[in-house]
Image (tube, rainbow, N blue to C red):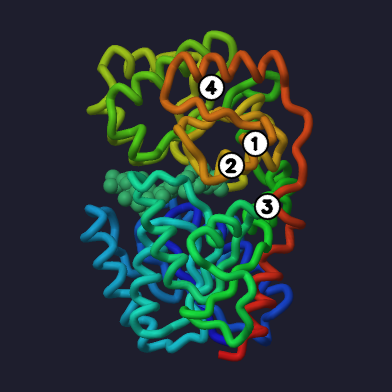
Amino acid sequence: MKIVTIIGARPQIIKAAALSRAIKTHYANKIQEIIVHTGQHYDDNMSAVFFDELGIPRPDYNLHVGSASHGVQTARMTEGIEGILLKEQPDFIVLYGDTNSTLAGAVAAAKIHIPIAHVEAGLRSFNKAMPEEINRIVCDHCSTLLFSPTQAGVENLQREGFALINEPPYTIDNPKVYHCGDIMYDNSLHFAEIAETKTNIINKLGLKDRPFILATIHRDTNTDYPERLDAIFSALLTLSEQYHVVLPLHPRTNKLLKTNLEAAKQEQLFSSPNISIIPPVSFLEMIALERHARLVMTDSGGVQKEAYFFKKPCIILRPETEWIEIVQTGNAILADANESRIMQAWQHFNDNPPTKFPEIFGDSHAAEFILNEMLQQEM
Ligand code: UD1
Ligand code: UDP
Protein backbone atom coordinates (compact mmCIF):
# COMPACT_ATOMS: atom_id res chain seq x y z
CA MET A 1 0.00 0.00 0.00
CA LYS A 2 1.25 3.44 -0.87
CA ILE A 3 0.17 6.42 1.22
CA VAL A 4 0.85 10.12 0.90
CA THR A 5 0.99 11.90 4.27
CA ILE A 6 0.43 15.65 4.37
CA ILE A 7 2.08 17.68 7.11
CA GLY A 8 2.53 21.42 7.39
CA ALA A 9 1.88 22.92 10.81
CA ARG A 10 3.78 21.99 13.99
CA PRO A 11 1.16 19.69 15.54
CA GLN A 12 0.82 17.70 12.32
CA ILE A 13 4.53 17.05 12.15
CA ILE A 14 4.39 15.70 15.69
CA LYS A 15 1.27 13.60 14.98
CA ALA A 16 2.87 12.13 11.85
CA ALA A 17 5.68 10.78 14.03
CA ALA A 18 3.26 8.27 15.58
CA LEU A 19 2.20 6.80 12.24
CA SER A 20 5.71 6.82 10.77
CA ARG A 21 6.99 5.02 13.86
CA ALA A 22 4.26 2.36 13.60
CA ILE A 23 5.01 1.88 9.88
CA LYS A 24 8.70 1.42 10.62
CA THR A 25 8.07 -0.97 13.51
CA HIS A 26 5.19 -3.10 12.21
CA TYR A 27 4.47 -2.49 8.54
CA ALA A 28 7.78 -1.64 6.86
CA ASN A 29 7.31 -4.30 4.17
CA LYS A 30 3.63 -3.50 3.60
CA ILE A 31 3.34 0.27 3.50
CA GLN A 32 5.28 2.85 1.52
CA GLU A 33 4.87 6.34 3.00
CA ILE A 34 5.53 9.47 0.93
CA ILE A 35 5.69 12.56 3.15
CA VAL A 36 4.66 15.95 1.77
CA HIS A 37 5.46 19.04 3.84
CA THR A 38 3.42 22.00 2.67
CA GLY A 39 5.82 24.45 4.31
CA GLN A 40 2.99 26.11 6.28
CA HIS A 41 5.39 26.22 9.24
CA TYR A 42 9.00 26.77 8.31
CA ASP A 43 11.04 28.24 11.19
CA ASP A 44 13.51 25.66 12.46
CA ASN A 45 11.83 25.61 15.88
CA MET A 46 8.38 25.12 14.30
CA SER A 47 9.39 22.36 11.89
CA ALA A 48 12.97 21.07 11.43
CA VAL A 49 13.53 20.46 15.16
CA PHE A 50 10.90 17.71 15.23
CA PHE A 51 12.28 15.52 12.45
CA ASP A 52 15.49 14.37 14.11
CA GLU A 53 14.11 14.44 17.62
CA LEU A 54 11.06 12.30 16.83
CA GLY A 55 12.66 10.12 14.16
CA ILE A 56 10.36 11.29 11.35
CA PRO A 57 11.65 10.54 7.85
CA ARG A 58 12.62 13.65 5.85
CA PRO A 59 9.76 14.85 3.64
CA ASP A 60 9.89 13.54 0.08
CA TYR A 61 8.43 16.85 -1.08
CA ASN A 62 8.35 20.35 0.41
CA LEU A 63 6.00 22.84 -1.19
CA HIS A 64 7.50 25.82 0.70
CA VAL A 65 4.21 27.72 0.67
CA GLY A 66 5.06 29.78 3.76
CA SER A 67 2.71 32.30 5.34
CA ALA A 68 -0.10 34.06 3.48
CA SER A 69 -3.81 34.81 3.79
CA HIS A 70 -6.06 31.77 4.13
CA GLY A 71 -7.11 31.79 0.49
CA VAL A 72 -3.66 32.29 -0.98
CA GLN A 73 -1.98 29.81 1.35
CA THR A 74 -4.61 27.12 0.81
CA ALA A 75 -4.65 27.63 -2.95
CA ARG A 76 -0.87 27.25 -3.23
CA MET A 77 -0.96 24.09 -1.17
CA THR A 78 -3.89 22.63 -3.11
CA GLU A 79 -2.11 23.14 -6.41
CA GLY A 80 1.11 21.58 -5.12
CA ILE A 81 -0.60 18.61 -3.49
CA GLU A 82 -2.70 17.90 -6.58
CA GLY A 83 0.45 17.65 -8.72
CA ILE A 84 2.08 15.23 -6.30
CA LEU A 85 -1.03 13.05 -6.01
CA LEU A 86 -1.35 12.81 -9.78
CA LYS A 87 2.26 11.72 -10.00
CA GLU A 88 2.33 9.34 -7.04
CA GLN A 89 -1.20 7.84 -7.38
CA PRO A 90 -1.33 6.64 -3.76
CA ASP A 91 -3.92 4.25 -2.34
CA PHE A 92 -4.66 6.81 0.39
CA ILE A 93 -3.83 10.33 1.39
CA VAL A 94 -3.47 10.71 5.16
CA LEU A 95 -4.58 14.05 6.62
CA TYR A 96 -4.18 15.19 10.21
CA GLY A 97 -6.31 17.55 12.23
CA ASP A 98 -7.72 20.81 11.03
CA THR A 99 -5.17 23.21 9.58
CA ASN A 100 -5.08 24.84 6.16
CA SER A 101 -2.72 22.03 5.10
CA THR A 102 -5.50 19.55 6.00
CA LEU A 103 -8.06 21.49 4.00
CA ALA A 104 -5.82 21.75 0.96
CA GLY A 105 -5.10 18.02 1.04
CA ALA A 106 -8.81 17.22 1.32
CA VAL A 107 -9.88 19.38 -1.59
CA ALA A 108 -7.01 18.28 -3.81
CA ALA A 109 -7.52 14.58 -3.16
CA ALA A 110 -11.32 14.43 -3.24
CA LYS A 111 -11.52 16.08 -6.67
CA ILE A 112 -9.20 13.54 -8.25
CA HIS A 113 -10.74 10.59 -6.40
CA ILE A 114 -7.87 9.69 -4.09
CA PRO A 115 -9.40 8.23 -0.88
CA ILE A 116 -8.77 10.26 2.25
CA ALA A 117 -7.98 8.87 5.69
CA HIS A 118 -8.64 11.65 8.21
CA VAL A 119 -6.89 11.28 11.54
CA GLU A 120 -8.67 13.32 14.27
CA ALA A 121 -12.02 13.17 12.51
CA GLY A 122 -15.27 14.31 14.08
CA LEU A 123 -13.98 16.96 16.45
CA ARG A 124 -16.16 20.04 16.59
CA SER A 125 -16.00 23.29 18.53
CA PHE A 126 -19.37 24.39 17.08
CA ASN A 127 -17.76 27.75 16.38
CA LYS A 128 -17.46 28.38 12.66
CA ALA A 129 -15.59 31.62 13.27
CA MET A 130 -12.57 29.35 13.84
CA PRO A 131 -10.79 28.60 10.56
CA GLU A 132 -10.09 25.14 11.99
CA GLU A 133 -13.81 24.34 12.30
CA ILE A 134 -14.32 24.97 8.58
CA ASN A 135 -11.26 22.87 7.78
CA ARG A 136 -12.46 19.96 9.93
CA ILE A 137 -15.96 19.89 8.49
CA VAL A 138 -14.77 20.01 4.88
CA CYS A 139 -12.13 17.37 5.45
CA ASP A 140 -14.51 14.99 7.22
CA HIS A 141 -17.10 15.30 4.48
CA CYS A 142 -14.49 14.52 1.80
CA SER A 143 -13.07 11.52 3.68
CA THR A 144 -13.44 7.78 3.14
CA LEU A 145 -11.96 6.60 6.46
CA LEU A 146 -12.67 8.81 9.46
CA PHE A 147 -10.58 8.06 12.53
CA SER A 148 -12.09 9.77 15.55
CA PRO A 149 -10.01 9.95 18.72
CA THR A 150 -13.06 10.26 20.99
CA GLN A 151 -16.61 9.02 21.38
CA ALA A 152 -17.82 12.64 21.19
CA GLY A 153 -16.20 12.83 17.74
CA VAL A 154 -18.12 9.77 16.57
CA GLU A 155 -21.39 11.27 17.85
CA ASN A 156 -20.70 14.57 16.10
CA LEU A 157 -20.25 12.71 12.81
CA GLN A 158 -23.45 10.76 13.38
CA ARG A 159 -25.33 14.02 13.90
CA GLU A 160 -23.95 15.28 10.57
CA GLY A 161 -25.37 12.28 8.76
CA PHE A 162 -22.53 9.76 8.84
CA ALA A 163 -23.92 6.25 9.21
CA LEU A 164 -22.09 3.93 11.57
CA ILE A 165 -23.42 0.82 9.86
CA ASN A 166 -21.80 1.21 6.45
CA GLU A 167 -20.29 -1.94 4.96
CA PRO A 168 -17.16 -2.21 2.82
CA PRO A 169 -16.04 -1.33 0.24
CA TYR A 170 -15.78 2.15 1.74
CA THR A 171 -15.80 5.21 -0.49
CA ILE A 172 -16.27 8.95 -0.14
CA ASP A 173 -20.02 8.27 -0.48
CA ASN A 174 -19.97 5.23 1.80
CA PRO A 175 -17.45 6.30 4.43
CA LYS A 176 -16.35 4.41 7.52
CA VAL A 177 -16.21 6.03 10.96
CA TYR A 178 -13.89 4.52 13.57
CA HIS A 179 -13.40 5.33 17.23
CA CYS A 180 -9.71 4.60 17.60
CA GLY A 181 -8.16 6.71 20.36
CA ASP A 182 -5.70 9.53 20.04
CA ILE A 183 -2.36 9.16 18.28
CA MET A 184 -1.04 12.01 20.40
CA TYR A 185 -1.62 9.81 23.43
CA ASP A 186 0.57 7.20 21.68
CA ASN A 187 3.23 9.86 21.18
CA SER A 188 3.11 11.41 24.62
CA LEU A 189 3.50 8.05 26.35
CA HIS A 190 6.22 6.94 23.95
CA PHE A 191 8.31 10.09 24.43
CA ALA A 192 7.59 10.84 28.12
CA GLU A 193 10.54 8.94 29.61
CA ILE A 194 12.84 9.84 26.73
CA ALA A 195 12.06 13.50 27.45
CA GLU A 196 13.30 13.12 31.02
CA THR A 197 16.69 11.83 29.99
CA LYS A 198 17.27 13.70 26.75
CA THR A 199 16.31 17.25 27.75
CA ASN A 200 17.69 19.69 30.22
CA ILE A 201 15.09 22.43 30.00
CA ILE A 202 13.90 22.14 33.59
CA ASN A 203 17.40 22.77 34.93
CA LYS A 204 18.20 25.30 32.25
CA LEU A 205 15.23 27.46 33.27
CA GLY A 206 15.93 26.99 36.99
CA LEU A 207 12.66 25.14 37.53
CA LYS A 208 13.88 22.10 39.42
CA ASP A 209 12.40 23.00 42.78
CA ARG A 210 10.26 25.84 41.62
CA PRO A 211 6.53 25.40 40.95
CA PHE A 212 5.57 26.92 37.64
CA ILE A 213 2.70 27.49 35.25
CA LEU A 214 3.19 26.51 31.61
CA ALA A 215 1.37 28.77 29.16
CA THR A 216 0.96 28.80 25.38
CA ILE A 217 -1.08 31.25 23.30
CA HIS A 218 -1.44 31.32 19.54
CA ARG A 219 -5.11 31.28 18.44
CA ASP A 220 -6.03 34.10 16.07
CA THR A 221 -9.09 34.80 18.23
CA ASN A 222 -6.67 35.77 21.01
CA THR A 223 -3.66 37.21 19.19
CA ASP A 224 -5.67 39.44 16.86
CA TYR A 225 -7.77 41.21 19.52
CA PRO A 226 -5.98 43.69 21.84
CA GLU A 227 -8.59 43.44 24.59
CA ARG A 228 -8.32 39.65 24.69
CA LEU A 229 -4.52 39.70 24.68
CA ASP A 230 -4.62 42.28 27.46
CA ALA A 231 -6.93 40.12 29.60
CA ILE A 232 -4.74 37.02 29.19
CA PHE A 233 -1.46 38.79 29.87
CA SER A 234 -2.89 40.75 32.82
CA ALA A 235 -3.90 37.44 34.41
CA LEU A 236 -0.46 35.95 33.69
CA LEU A 237 1.26 38.94 35.28
CA THR A 238 -0.90 38.60 38.42
CA LEU A 239 -0.31 34.85 38.61
CA SER A 240 3.44 35.32 38.18
CA GLU A 241 3.49 36.98 41.62
CA GLN A 242 2.68 33.53 43.07
CA TYR A 243 4.23 31.09 40.60
CA HIS A 244 6.84 31.30 37.92
CA VAL A 245 5.35 31.36 34.40
CA VAL A 246 6.98 29.70 31.38
CA LEU A 247 5.71 30.84 28.00
CA PRO A 248 7.18 29.30 24.84
CA LEU A 249 6.07 31.94 22.37
CA HIS A 250 4.48 30.99 19.04
CA PRO A 251 5.80 33.17 16.17
CA ARG A 252 2.31 34.47 15.46
CA THR A 253 1.97 35.73 19.05
CA ASN A 254 5.51 37.08 19.06
CA LYS A 255 4.64 39.18 16.03
CA LEU A 256 1.23 40.38 17.18
CA LEU A 257 2.18 41.17 20.78
CA LYS A 258 4.23 44.05 19.42
CA THR A 259 1.21 45.74 17.87
CA ASN A 260 -1.69 44.43 19.94
CA LEU A 261 -0.43 44.68 23.52
CA GLU A 262 0.18 48.10 25.02
CA ALA A 263 3.85 49.03 25.33
CA ALA A 264 3.86 49.34 29.14
CA LYS A 265 2.48 45.82 29.53
CA GLN A 266 5.00 44.43 27.05
CA GLU A 267 7.77 46.04 29.08
CA GLN A 268 6.39 44.54 32.31
CA LEU A 269 6.10 41.13 30.71
CA PHE A 270 9.52 40.94 29.14
CA SER A 271 11.34 42.39 32.15
CA SER A 272 9.64 40.28 34.83
CA PRO A 273 12.03 37.88 36.61
CA ASN A 274 9.02 35.63 37.26
CA ILE A 275 8.15 35.06 33.61
CA SER A 276 10.32 33.09 31.19
CA ILE A 277 9.31 34.03 27.66
CA ILE A 278 11.22 31.65 25.45
CA PRO A 279 11.20 30.68 21.75
CA PRO A 280 9.10 27.64 20.78
CA VAL A 281 10.62 24.53 22.31
CA SER A 282 11.08 21.04 20.90
CA PHE A 283 8.43 18.38 21.56
CA LEU A 284 10.62 16.57 24.10
CA GLU A 285 11.22 19.85 25.92
CA MET A 286 7.51 20.61 25.82
CA ILE A 287 6.67 17.23 27.32
CA ALA A 288 9.23 17.77 30.06
CA LEU A 289 7.67 21.16 30.83
CA GLU A 290 4.17 19.70 30.85
CA ARG A 291 5.18 16.89 33.20
CA HIS A 292 6.79 19.24 35.69
CA ALA A 293 4.30 22.12 35.53
CA ARG A 294 1.85 22.73 38.32
CA LEU A 295 -0.83 23.89 35.91
CA VAL A 296 -1.20 24.52 32.19
CA MET A 297 -2.85 27.57 30.63
CA THR A 298 -3.39 27.39 26.91
CA ASP A 299 -5.51 28.04 23.86
CA SER A 300 -3.83 25.13 22.02
CA GLY A 301 -5.80 22.01 21.19
CA GLY A 302 -2.79 19.73 21.57
CA VAL A 303 -1.43 21.25 24.75
CA GLN A 304 -4.75 21.08 26.65
CA LYS A 305 -4.87 17.37 25.92
CA GLU A 306 -1.26 16.75 26.85
CA ALA A 307 -1.97 18.47 30.19
CA TYR A 308 -4.62 15.78 30.69
CA PHE A 309 -2.26 12.97 29.61
CA PHE A 310 0.20 14.13 32.26
CA LYS A 311 -2.54 14.65 34.88
CA LYS A 312 -2.28 18.41 35.13
CA PRO A 313 -5.17 20.86 35.54
CA CYS A 314 -5.67 23.12 32.57
CA ILE A 315 -7.17 26.57 32.09
CA ILE A 316 -8.37 26.81 28.49
CA LEU A 317 -8.12 30.32 27.07
CA ARG A 318 -11.03 29.81 24.72
CA PRO A 319 -14.82 29.97 25.04
CA GLU A 320 -15.25 26.38 23.91
CA THR A 321 -13.24 23.29 23.08
CA GLU A 322 -13.50 20.35 20.73
CA TRP A 323 -11.93 18.18 23.49
CA ILE A 324 -14.99 18.40 25.71
CA GLU A 325 -14.13 15.32 27.78
CA ILE A 326 -11.35 17.06 29.65
CA VAL A 327 -13.79 19.78 30.73
CA GLN A 328 -16.54 17.29 31.54
CA THR A 329 -14.22 15.33 33.82
CA GLY A 330 -13.44 18.55 35.71
CA ASN A 331 -9.75 18.61 34.77
CA ALA A 332 -9.95 21.67 32.55
CA ILE A 333 -11.93 24.90 32.81
CA LEU A 334 -13.01 27.08 29.90
CA ALA A 335 -12.01 30.55 31.09
CA ASP A 336 -11.93 32.22 27.67
CA ALA A 337 -9.81 35.39 27.45
CA ASN A 338 -11.46 36.74 30.59
CA GLU A 339 -9.19 37.90 33.38
CA SER A 340 -11.54 37.25 36.28
CA ARG A 341 -12.58 33.83 34.96
CA ILE A 342 -8.92 32.89 34.57
CA MET A 343 -8.24 33.94 38.16
CA GLN A 344 -11.31 32.01 39.41
CA ALA A 345 -10.20 28.90 37.53
CA TRP A 346 -6.75 29.22 39.05
CA GLN A 347 -8.24 29.54 42.53
CA HIS A 348 -10.46 26.53 41.91
CA PHE A 349 -7.56 24.29 40.87
CA ASN A 350 -5.40 25.62 43.69
CA ASP A 351 -8.07 24.70 46.25
CA ASN A 352 -9.09 21.42 44.56
CA PRO A 353 -6.22 19.89 42.60
CA PRO A 354 -7.79 17.26 40.31
CA THR A 355 -6.82 13.68 41.00
CA LYS A 356 -8.95 11.57 38.62
CA PHE A 357 -8.01 11.40 34.96
CA PRO A 358 -10.00 8.52 33.41
CA GLU A 359 -8.53 6.84 30.30
CA ILE A 360 -10.56 8.49 27.55
CA PHE A 361 -7.98 8.77 24.80
CA GLY A 362 -7.55 5.11 23.92
CA ASP A 363 -4.91 2.51 24.64
CA SER A 364 -1.89 4.27 23.05
CA HIS A 365 -2.06 2.00 19.99
CA ALA A 366 -4.16 4.25 17.77
CA ALA A 367 -1.48 4.47 15.06
CA GLU A 368 -1.35 0.68 14.62
CA PHE A 369 -5.14 0.51 14.54
CA ILE A 370 -5.29 3.16 11.82
CA LEU A 371 -2.67 1.47 9.64
CA ASN A 372 -4.23 -1.92 10.12
CA GLU A 373 -7.65 -0.66 9.04
CA MET A 374 -6.16 1.06 5.99
CA LEU A 375 -4.45 -2.18 5.01
CA GLN A 376 -7.79 -4.03 5.25
CA GLN A 377 -9.36 -1.89 2.52
CA GLU A 378 -9.34 -3.25 -0.96
CA MET A 379 -9.72 -0.08 -2.94
C1 UD1 B 1 -1.77 27.19 12.36
C2 UD1 B 1 -3.14 26.53 12.23
C3 UD1 B 1 -3.72 26.26 13.60
C4 UD1 B 1 -2.76 25.48 14.48
C5 UD1 B 1 -1.40 26.16 14.49
C6 UD1 B 1 -0.41 25.29 15.21
C7 UD1 B 1 -4.49 27.15 10.29
C8 UD1 B 1 -5.62 27.98 9.80
N1 UD1 B 1 -4.07 27.40 11.54
O1 UD1 B 1 -1.98 28.45 12.99
O2 UD1 B 1 -4.91 25.51 13.48
O3 UD1 B 1 -3.28 25.43 15.77
O4 UD1 B 1 -0.94 26.36 13.14
O5 UD1 B 1 0.71 25.99 15.63
O6 UD1 B 1 -4.01 26.32 9.57
N2 UD1 B 1 4.93 32.09 11.40
C9 UD1 B 1 6.29 32.21 11.49
N3 UD1 B 1 7.05 31.09 11.30
C10 UD1 B 1 6.53 29.87 11.05
C11 UD1 B 1 5.14 29.77 10.95
C12 UD1 B 1 4.35 30.87 11.14
O7 UD1 B 1 6.81 33.30 11.73
O8 UD1 B 1 7.28 28.90 10.90
C13 UD1 B 1 4.09 33.30 11.65
C14 UD1 B 1 3.79 34.07 10.39
O9 UD1 B 1 3.79 35.41 10.72
C15 UD1 B 1 2.38 33.63 10.04
C16 UD1 B 1 1.78 33.39 11.41
O10 UD1 B 1 2.85 32.89 12.20
O11 UD1 B 1 1.67 34.59 9.32
C17 UD1 B 1 0.63 32.40 11.43
O12 UD1 B 1 1.02 31.16 10.81
P1 UD1 B 1 -0.11 30.20 10.16
O13 UD1 B 1 0.49 28.91 9.80
O14 UD1 B 1 -0.84 30.93 9.10
O15 UD1 B 1 -1.15 30.02 11.31
P2 UD1 B 1 -0.90 29.60 12.84
O16 UD1 B 1 -1.39 30.70 13.69
O17 UD1 B 1 0.46 29.09 13.02
N1 UDP C 1 4.55 22.18 21.15
C1 UDP C 1 5.95 22.11 21.04
N2 UDP C 1 6.68 23.23 21.35
C2 UDP C 1 6.11 24.40 21.78
C3 UDP C 1 4.69 24.44 21.89
C4 UDP C 1 3.94 23.31 21.55
O1 UDP C 1 6.50 21.07 20.68
O2 UDP C 1 6.83 25.37 22.04
C5 UDP C 1 3.77 20.99 20.80
C6 UDP C 1 2.80 20.54 21.86
O3 UDP C 1 3.43 19.70 22.79
C7 UDP C 1 1.72 19.85 21.04
C8 UDP C 1 1.73 20.62 19.75
O4 UDP C 1 2.96 21.32 19.69
O5 UDP C 1 2.07 18.50 20.77
C9 UDP C 1 0.59 21.58 19.74
O6 UDP C 1 0.74 22.46 18.70
P1 UDP C 1 0.09 23.91 18.69
O7 UDP C 1 -0.20 24.36 20.07
O8 UDP C 1 0.98 24.75 17.87
O9 UDP C 1 -1.25 23.67 17.83
P2 UDP C 1 -2.69 23.06 18.12
O10 UDP C 1 -2.55 21.78 18.82
O11 UDP C 1 -3.47 24.09 18.88
O12 UDP C 1 -3.26 22.92 16.74
SS for dot 3 = helix
| In this view, the mark in front (4 or 1) | 1
What distance separates the C-alpha of mark 3 from that of mark 1?
19 Å
Labels 4 and 3: the sequence-earlier one: 3
- Residue 160 in the figure: left or right of residue 103: right
Amino acid, disc 3: Tyr
Label ID, residue 245: 4
What distance separates the C-alpha of mark 2 from that of mark 4?
26 Å
Label ID, residue 348: none
Q: Is residue 284 above or below residue 243?
A: below
Image marks 4 and 1: residues in contact by CB distance under 8 Å: no
Label ID, residue 328: 1
Labels 4 and 1: the sequence-earlier one: 4
What distance separates the C-alpha of mark 4 from that of mark 3?
25 Å
Labels 2 and 4: the sequence-earlier one: 4
Mark 1 within 8 Å of ligand 2, using the beta carbon: no
| In this view, the mark in front (4 or 3) | 3
Residue identified by numbered label 2: 324
SS for dot 4 = strand
Residue identified by numbered label 3: 185
Amino acid, disc 1: Gln
